[in-house]
Image (cartoon, helix red, strand yellow):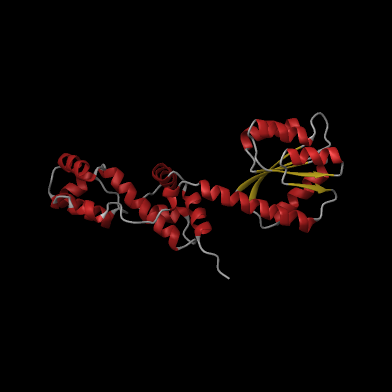
Amino acid sequence: MLNLMIVDDEPIIIKGLTNIVKKSNTPCKEIVTASDGHDALEKMEAFKPDLLITDIEMAEMNGLELIREAQERQLCKRFIILTGYEETVYLREAIRRKVIDYLLKPINKAEFLGLLSDVCLEIVREHSAARPKTALAEVGPVLPEDKRGQMSRNIRNVVEYIDLHYMQDLSLDMISEHVELHPNYISSLFKKETGLTFIHYLHLCRIKKAKRLMLESDEFSFQEISEEVGYENVRHFFSVFKKYTGVTPGEFREGCRQSLPMTH
């Protein structure tokens, strides 16, 4: 999902562009509009647009001044100018500011959507490349086989029990009954031999299964995945997933989609 800002002092232009973008198949799902440069800068502080489309001739602050301010404050990296003025001085300044394109009003809808799609694709690829790699790593075992081979029989039994029952409301007391050892002893030995606490290992097992479900199908809702792996509260699932992977479940799923090979 990308953030788009449209700046123009003509309400009809803003309405027209917004409708075109919303009705088209682009990743620009969040759109914020502004009627002048000062209004735009104020909104950009919180909105952080991935792309800014702006008119040039506006009261108080023109579009080129807006772009300069936005670049200096690092509020946005990509800009498209949409204007009714084809003046050399404007074109030169736009080039100096490394504007993506300079479109003249009235816009050609097909040309505009083609440009927007190209820019969005570039932004999505950039976001994907910057996404933490750990989130999209191969979903392998929580503990490697060589690590398991070094564990005592008691802790191997604990690990195997968690691997099979991670979707349940597990506790050390439940596991202690299974292996017939005191919970405190299990906790201490588990940390010593695996390097992880019991709850840490349990979360990793659940996250591993959640990743597999997301890789297997887009049809599972996050509520369904949450319940399937042992979290009754989907907000808790989101919190734990983000803590241990660095990304949200939604970002992980989107990354998986983008990493799939193109088919024709």
Number of marks? 0
Q: 99 or 55, which is in the foreground? A: 99
Q: Is residue 7 visible?
A: no
In the displayed structure, 216 sits above or below 162; it is below
Name the spot of residue 152 as percent of width and height, x first: 14, 50
Q: What residue appears at the point 73 percent right and 55 percent down from the top-left corner?
A: 113
Q: Residue lying furthest bottom in this view?
A: 264
Asked if residue 23 lies left or right of residue 259, the reply is right
Quarter of the rendering occupied by the C terminus? bottom right
Asked if residue 56 lies left or right of residue 202, the reply is right
Q: What residue appears at the point 81 percent right and 55 percent down from the top-left corner?
A: 108
Name the spot of residue 163 as percent of width and height, x first: 27, 55
In the displayed structure, 81 sits above or below 22; it is above
Q: Can residue 100 be seen in this view?
A: yes
Q: What residue appears at the point 52 percent right and 54 percent down from the top-left corner?
A: 254
Q: What residue appears at the point 66 percent right and 31 percent down from the top-left corner?
A: 72
Name the spot of residue 174 as percent of width and height, x first: 21, 48
Q: 21 or 139, which is in the foreground? A: 139
Asked if residue 40 lies left or right of residue 260, the reply is right
Q: Residue lying furthest top in this view?
A: 60
Q: Quadrant of residue 138?
A: bottom left
Name the spot of residue 64 as percent of width and height, x first: 77, 35
Asked if residue 149 lies left or right of residue 224, the reply is left
